[in-house]
Amino acid sequence: MTFMHKLSSRLSRLRLIGLLGLIAVTWVSAGCLDQVASNAFDPAGSGGSPAKADLVVAPHTVTLEAGQSAQFKATTGDVEWFATDGGDISAAGVFASSRPGTYHIVGHPRGVLGHQDSATVIVVAAVVNLDRVVIAPDTATIGTGGSLTFSAHGTTAAGAAVPIGVVWSTSRGTIDAAGVYSAPNDVGTYQVIVTNTAGDKADTASVRVVAVSVPLPPTEQPRQPDQPTVPQPQQPTLPPPSVNPPASNPTVLPPVVPGPIDWSRPAGSLPTQASALVALDIVGPTLTAAQSAAQGGMFSTY
């Protein structure tokens, strides 16, 4: 084997090793990005640990026109941003795409994978025959510090509803790119304005912000003392009247032994003998009635 042949063989092996290394680096990089994107829809991430509750990406869902940009924010300070499906997002969280389609925005704390949140961006083509912009709802009432989501769409001259990219603004409070309105702490009536990306068509909603009353706990009533129980007088219970009261038994007098009548006594006096006499004195002429109680009694009148 000549020297040139050996050198050629060694160079070929080196090129093969370099190519394999490049493939490995590319595979690892693609795998990391895919892991980040897949973890955007898995709050636990690859490590299986719960996602940090303080990391939230906003807005959560937004519709943009091709070439329109939107600002994304996260509740944590130092965030790394990724856009899948060929979208472009800056380090400051500004996304834009010139191609219609659906994109996913992923944000996670810098240097920490598996603890992230995501948002969805729908990019639509500009509508050339747009007639007007419609906001919904057109009136609303919310409490101070509350939030309400508005939506908007376009209509063509034929009356067909079409999705469009819009720009939101408000006279008081704040509203994000997805139409989520946050009311101020001051009561009043304010406006939410939506315009198309060209700025030549708009619609307005009226928002009435009212004070939120905090319900007070129920007041406990003092316990009333127990009232003494006063016994009610009992009514006597009378026996029911008898329909046919029983006949009273007649008093039977014992037989009287007959005896002689002594007429020598003064009128109106009773004899002392065993005879039974009844004498009646009537004022005026004296009338004495005597009945012998002997068998077959006799009456005499004087």
Image (cartoon, grey):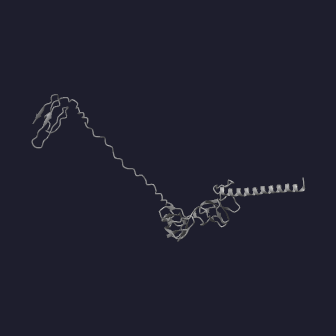
Horizontal side of 186 relative to 73 (left or right) equals left
In the displayed orientation, state which residue is furthest to the top.
295
Question: Percent position (x, y) of residue 258?
Answer: 18, 29
Quarter occupied by residue 166: bottom right
Q: Residue at x 84, y 57 (%)?
A: 11
Q: 65 or 63: nearer the eye?
A: 65
How many numbered circles are shown? Answer: 0
Q: Quadrant of the C terminus?
A: top left
Q: Residue at x 65, y 64 (%)?
A: 88
Is 42 drawn above or below residue 142 in the view shown?
above
Question: Percent position (x, y) of residue 157?
Answer: 48, 64
Q: Residue at x 71, y 57 (%)?
A: 30
Q: 82 or 294: nearer the eye?
A: 82
Is 163 drawn above or below residue 172 in the view shown?
above
Is 32 drawn above or below residue 282 in the view shown?
below
In the displayed orientation, state which residue is furthest to the right.
2
Quarter occupied by residue 51: bottom right
Q: Is residue 212 visible?
A: no
Q: Residue at x 73, y 57 (%)?
A: 26
Q: 268 or 2: nearer the eye?
A: 2
Question: Percent position (x, y) of residue 85?
Answer: 64, 59
Question: Percent position (x, y) of residue 252?
Answer: 23, 32
Q: Is residue 8 visible?
A: yes
